[in-house]
Structure formats: C-alpha cells, structure tokens
Image (tube, rainbow, N blue to C red):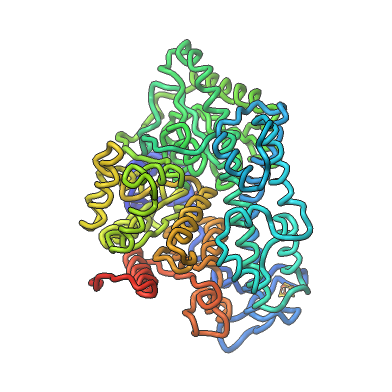
Amino acid sequence: MIKTFLATDLTIDTGVQELLLKANSEGIETAFDRAKQQEPHCKFGLAGVCCRRCMMGPCRISFGEKGAKRGGCGATADQIVARNLLTLIVDGATPHVEHAREVAHTLLEAAEGIAPYEIKGKDKLWKIALDLGLTLEGKSTNEVAKEVALIALQDFQKQTGVATWLSLHAHAKSVETWEKLNILPRNAHLEIANAINKAAMGCDSDPLNLLLGVMTMALVEGYDGLHLSTDLSDVLFGTPKLVKAQYNMGVIKADYVNIAVHGHIPMVSEKVVEWSRKLNGEAKALGAQGINVIGICCSANELLMRQGVSVATNFASQELAIVTGALEAMVVDAQCIMPGLQKVAECYHTELISTLPNIKIEGSSHVEFSPAKADQMGEEIVRKALARYTERDMVKLQIPKGTVEAYAGFSVEQIVEVLSKINQEDPLQPFIQALTDGDILGVVAIVGCTNPRVKQDWANTELAKELLKHNVLIVATGCSAHSLGKFGLLSPEGIEYCGPKLANVLKTMGEANGLTSLPPAWHMGSCVDNSRIDDLLVALANRVGVGVRDLPVAGSSPEPQSPKALSIGTFFIAQGVDVHIGLNAPISGSPFVENALTGDKGDFAVTTDELFGGKLIYEEDPIKAAHVLLQRIIKKRTALGLQSPDLEF
Ligand code: NFS
Ligand code: SF4
C-alpha cells in the first residue's frame, strides 16, 4: 500500500475518494495502489514489441540504433506487433463470444423446459425468427425459441458461408467492403482458432495479412459476440425500456442486506434479483428493511436497463464497494472481476461468490451456475448473503452519502418509440432532420471502462461535456456510461452542458414523452449492447441511403482498460467509424501497424481509413480528443453536403 496519496488525484468520484481514505487508514490495498506499484510500465510491453511465442525467446526489439532488430526466429517489430495485436483482439472478442454462446445455450434449455427462465421478449423473438426466414404459423413460443437458439449455435459450428448473425445485422455496403477484402467470418470458434493459429510461432508473418485477421476477429466480436448476446438476452429477459434509477456508492443501504452483482452474464444476475425478491421477508425477519441488490460494471448495466436496479460503481473502484463494510455478498460471474477482490473481502464480513463453472476466484466461495440449476444457484446465493448480515461489523460501516438520478434503457426499440411521439409514420425523420440541420452536429458513443492509470471518470465526463457543448449527442455503454451517470449526464438536468441547439432538440423530444427533456447522454446498455449503437447507425444509414462510414458519428473510449474495448473499437472501425482511445494500444513499436490504424487516407501503403473509412485516434487529453472528433465529424458532414458551424476551440 502506498503511504501517501491524494485520493483526489485518483478519481473525481467523491464517494470513491472517501472510501480510498478509509481503505488507506485500514491498511487495505486496492487497484489504485497496485497500479502505482507497476509504474513505470515496461516500455517494450507498452509498444507491443515483446514476444513470448516460443522458447527461443522471450525476444524484444530495441527502439534505438543498437540492439536487436529481429527476434530469434527473424520476426521484425512489424510482425511481432501485428501478431500481438491479433491475439489481444482475440482476448477481447472471446469473452463476448462465450457470453453469447452461454445465452444461446440457456435459451435452448429454456425452450426445452430444462432451464427455469420464462421467455419475456416475445416481440424480439418474433422479429429475429422472421429475419431468419422462419415460419411462425402454428408454432409455440418455445418451438420458435428452440429453432432460433439452434440457428444461433450454428454460428459456432458452420464450416462454410458467412456467420448468420453478421448477415442479420450488417449494412449491405459494409458487407461489400468486407467481401472484397475476404475477411468475412464463418463461425466464431473457427475464426478464434484460426487467429491463434495465424499468430503462433512460425505461422503468419505478413503484417498486412495479420491485420486483416484482426479485422475478421473484429467482425466475430461484433456479430457473434455483441449482437448475438444482446439479441438473445432481449429474447430471454425483454428489450430494455426507459427506466429511472440511482447512481453512486450511496445506493448501498445501511439498514438492508446488500448484495452486489458484478460481472456480465444476465442469467446469473437476473436470478439473484429474482431470489432477492422472493426471500425479502427473510431479511426482515433478521431485522433488516429488506434485500438491496446493487450493480457494478456490466451486470449493473444489464439489471439497470431491465430491472431498474441502481448502480454503485464502475470498474476501477469495484473493491471500494466492499470497503463500505455494508456488502453481505458480492456475486461475480465473468470478465473484469479483479482477483484482488477476495483479499479485500477477507477484511470484512463480505462473502465473494463466483458462479461460472470454469471461472473461479482463489479463496472465494463458489455456487455453480448451470441453466438447469439456475434457481438453486439464486436461492443459495441469497441465503448466503442473509447468513452474513448478522456478522456485519458496525464499526467498519461507512457508506458515502448521496445518489444521483439517471435514466437508462435506450434500446433502439425505445428510441424509435420515443421519436414516434414526434413523427408516428417515420420516427427516424425528426432525428435525421436535426442531424441535417446541425441541431445535432453528430453522435459520439462514449464507451468502455475506467482504468486506475487514468483519473477515474475524469476523461469520460470531460470528453462528454466538451462534445455536448458543441451540440454532439452522446450515446453511452459500459463503465463509461456509469461515469456519465455519476455526474448527472444521464439525467434531464444534464442538458445544462449542451449547446443551445442540442438542448432544444432534447427538450422537444423529452416533452413529447412527458419529460422536461431527454438526458444529454443516452444510456444504451452494457458493453455487449454496443450492438444497439451499431443497430442505430445501420438504421440511420439505411434511412438516409448512405453507408455507415458516411455518417457524422464517432466512438470513444477515454479510459480503456480491457482488450474488449479494443476489439469493440476495431469492430466500429471496420464499418468506417472513427474511434478514439485515451490510452494507447500496444502498437507504437511498429510504424506499419500504427500507421495502418491511425493514419489518414493516402498516408501510407494501407490504412483502415482508406479501406474502411474509419481510423483509430489516440489522444490522452479528453478536450483535445473531443476537438479531433469534432473535426472528423465535420469532415463527414461536409462530404454529405451538410453545413457545419466554424469551430472555435
Ligand atoms: Ni466493458 Fe463491461 Fe467495464 Fe470495461 Fe469491463 S465491465 S464489458 S470491459 S471495465 S466497460
Ligand atoms: Fe522470439 Fe520469434 Fe520465438 Fe517470438 S516467435 S519468442 S520473436 S523466436
């Protein structure tokens, strides 16, 4: 643990600051301490030029005149960086692909009557079934659901053709580009194996071919990761609708049995909520007011959107939720679960509970999830939490005060419904009119994580405010959406940050729906729900009659932590959307790879800007990043023949 630190340098969240001081005084180490201990980071690792792919190595390429220019096998910096990037994108995409497969498997078992889940999203099921060309006549919900689940599972098996979920969602112009480049994926598992095979020692050593492999993996991420997860989660649990909830550590309640759900997999978190409601009376029998479920990271997003569950915090401060001393249990499944949680939990009465059969945490308890035994899991977890309540140490209890109101639930279906209150026949028309007139200058998706290497929530919120000032509408997902929620940008009050034109549009749209205004940032869900942002872009492009690459939109991950942020970003670049990152990807050691991803059209032999119409933008300063994104948006507006104001920064 570092002895002296200023909590205000580490996060702008005052609740987290308070808990960092508490942790410090109790001698508890957190990710913020450990991140400092890792400084300075290895410069070879940061640049992506270290290779551990075989036992001739590890090898690293020197930056200066002197030193090795090739690894033991002869691999150059370009080749090593490209191979490392490919496996990094596999690291990002694979958890989402597993997420999707688990949802598909659960849907299948639910349809077969084996798994205790009711199919709540019938509308979504019908829509997907029709899009897949199935006939519905005379079939029960379960029969249709089974057919859909079996077709979805084919996206992990089929050896020829193109992944079905890509064909369901991709814009025709994007598919044309990908076909020409021969990067269309067949099935997710095959492409993951293919990518690992390409990157293996002595296999693919052509940096361009490796980068094309990166783009294939990005499409796997987009369609068999994000889209498949969202679609089938909506079928099982319903499509999100506008919902109001609270943000900040203050959502943890002193007089309740508190259960935090953390991770990503809605089959786990939904059952925890269901059983918390069923066993609420037992908490009262213990003298508590009831059971309070709160969310962390993307499980929070899933439950916020569908159940109105409030959000305690995001990635970087996950351990600090335990430091309140008020959590009876923290239930985790997969992805972004810090192993450090267990050590913190041991300082309190909190039980850390892992759930997925293949994902365990050293020292934690484990209550196993399987679709068929989901109810047993839910009940056992909640009973474990109840049992811990009486062990709470009141001396260690300290919950930062105050919560912030936030709206979430902006699925595309909900956005269309909101807009239909203005134009019933053609709901997207008022949105497109506002874009055309420049009342909405463009749309930027602020997505991804928080990272203890960056002052928590600072870059996410600064970038959002600067863009809003210039009338750019924000859509958000993941832990970035949580950053915006904590600081009021998911609430109608947040329009104080908007330029006058955007504020007017949001007021008009809000008033048509019985609100003072829509919030300036639309919370569209978890990280897999970046699929919803994609659907929105495809719908807008189709309505206008252009490609996704032509739209005045961009993406940004100001505080990225996970390789998932990079694989998702690359998916959007593949469609011609510019993507900003606030911490660099490990590519700077290769001029070829760096230029291919960040160069402009015509800059270099090959750039994604040239091939796809979008590029990677690396900028740590969120204000400068906002300005670069504004310039890129205006460039796209100009190409569409749209007027834009002269920007003054
Ligand atoms: Ni997304 Fe969600 Fe958060 Fe980053 Fe992790 S929880 S999948 S990766 S840290 S946003
Ligand atoms: Fe070194 Fe080549 Fe082996 Fe990598 S694959 S560790 S560069 S010898």
Position of residue 144 measured from the top left corner of the image (x, y, whole percent): 67, 36
Name which residue lies at 41% across and 63% down: 553
Name which residue lies at 38% across and 32% down: 251
Question: On the picture, is 454 further left or further right than 141?
Answer: left
Query: Against 128, is 180 above or below?
Result: below
Quadrant placement of the C terminus: bottom left
Question: On the picture, is 136 further left or further right than 407?
Answer: right
Position of residue 424 measured from the top left corner of the image (x, y, whole percent): 37, 44
Query: Against 147, is 281 above or below?
Result: above
Task: Report the number of discs.
Answer: 0
Instruction: Confirm whether residue 110 shows in the render.
Output: no
Position of residue 367 measured from the top left corner of the image (x, y, whole percent): 65, 30
Query: Against 492, is 353 above or below?
Result: above
Observer-nearest residue: 211 or 150?
150
Observer-nearest residue: 554 or 355?
554
Question: On the picture, is 559 further left or further right than 575?
Answer: left
Observer-nearest residue: 283 or 529?
529
Query: Against 202, is 31 above or below?
Result: above
Name which residue lies at 40% across and 50% down: 3
Corner quadrant of residue 290: top left
Position of residue 160 measured from the top left corner of the image (x, y, whole percent): 77, 60
| Outermost residue to the bottom | 65
Observer-nearest residue: 513 or 352?
513
Question: On the picture, is 320 further left or further right than 219?
Answer: left
